[in-house]
Image (cartoon, rainbow, N blue to C red):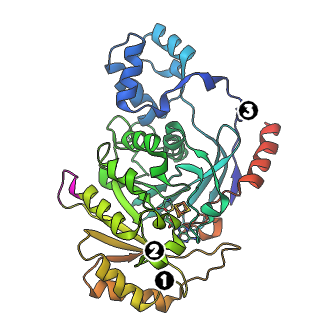
Amino acid sequence: MATAIATDKVIGTSAAQQKVNLLGLSAVKMSDFFASIGEKPFRSQQVMKWIHHLGVSDFAEMTNLSKALRDKLQEIACVEAPVVIEQHDSKDGTRKWLMQLSGGNCIETVFIPDNGRGTLCVSSQIGCSLDCSFCATGKQGFNRDLTTDEIVGQVWLAAKSFGTLAPKVPRKITNVVLMGMGEPLLNFDNVVDAVNIMMDDFGYGLSKRRVTLSTSGVVPELDRLGDYTDVSLAVSLHAPNDALRNELVPINKKYPIAMLLDSVKRYLDGLPDTHRKATIEYTLIGNVNDRPEHARELAQLLRDVPCKINLIPFNPFSGSGYESVTQQALSTFQNILIKAGYTATVRSTRGDDIAAACGQLAGQVNDRTRRSERYAQRV
Ligand code: SAH
Ligand code: SF4
């Protein structure tokens, strides 16, 4: 079901563009901002609470700030999220938003409820430059990086749509995964700030185990990630050897499997707590990487990597040229890994009816943009 959302903003022409968008400031940057206007550091915590705990974007409502400060903020700052153009609700409870950014392009954000857990899947770029052969986002090409406020804005808007940014309302979003459109490590600075806001007590207060960054393996950036954050890590492996991975994930030609897994181990070793594991994502594609010998090779490859394995049945999209995995191939693959001592789970396909499953997030940028422009002209 699609719902068009009313908005009073004219897309892409916000007068607030010149202002500092406080939605995207990490705790440190927020303190620096208040210091730069001669205010005490505790203003930063007050304002972060208004924005991220209570969902307030109008400075006039921030009643524990002096009138003079509220007026000043109105002049030089703003709290502005992307514009929700459409909301789709799947019959399984999955909800997908199409959000428009300045410049006119759209991104997709998905909420997946599951047994008391609520996982929000957010995008980090418009499109992706890495061109994995089985990924709809990759096929769409790369447009630009998202800003920190655009990444955090997805969480803010989703929480607001559930009415959970209010005092004493239980949180519906318990986990955030950077598994939407884009390669997070290629938008390093903005992603690091965004995950740190998600994990900040004055932000969304999510624990580091509940915020997961998924990467296809940009090794130099992964090597410096631990200097900035201790977010949980998921690695898109998809193949147990370089020959096959080169075909599926072209960045493997630059940073092959051995180099990637060494970098993953270094990241885990650098974390303060000893029992953290990486999630190895393995998209199973029919007759490509789903044979029993692939499972055995994978079990051997990962023997000294602290990890659990998440098997993702390939989600077909038109023109992909690949087939789905059969139920039998999937369970044989999973059983081989389990017998080898791994925790190997299968990611259930959710939100299929609204094209919200893994790898289906393409946004059909051009079509959608045209539709959104027509919509914007109406409001
Ligand atoms: N760029 C990052 C994060 C976004 S992709 C990465 O590649 O890790 C999120 C996950 O969805 C990745 O594991 C990706 O390989 C997987 N994926 C992409 N296309 C898919 C498809 N068509 N079917 C199933 N999984 C897919
Ligand atoms: Fe980019 Fe990830 Fe898709 Fe590869 S799988 S093209 S890295 S979004």
| Mark 3 Cα-neighbour bin, 10 Å: few <14, some 14–19, many ≥20 | some
Labels 2 & 3 near each other (Cβ < 8 A):
no
Q: Main secondary structure of the magenta part?
A: loop
Q: Secondary structure at mark 2?
A: loop
Residue farthest to the front?
254
Residue bearing the label numbered 2: 238
Q: Which residue is mark 3?
A: 10
- Which circle, 2 or 3, is nearer the viewer? 2
Q: Is mark 3 within 8 Å of ligand 2?
A: no
Picture residue at 53% right of the left edge, 88% below the top: 326
Dot 2 or dot 3: first in sequence order is: 3
User: Which secondary structure lies at badge 3?
Assistant: loop
- Mark 1 neighbour class, 10 Å CA radius: few under 14, some 14 to 19, many 20 or more: many
Q: Which residue has dot 1 on it?
A: 289
Magenta highlight on residue 346 = no
Residue 12 image offset from top left, x and y in percent: 70, 34
Q: Residues within 10 Å of mark 2 (few under 14, many from 20)?
A: many
Q: Does the magenta run of residues contain 272?
A: yes
Name the amino acid type tagged 3.
Val
The amino acid type of the residue labelled 2 equals: His
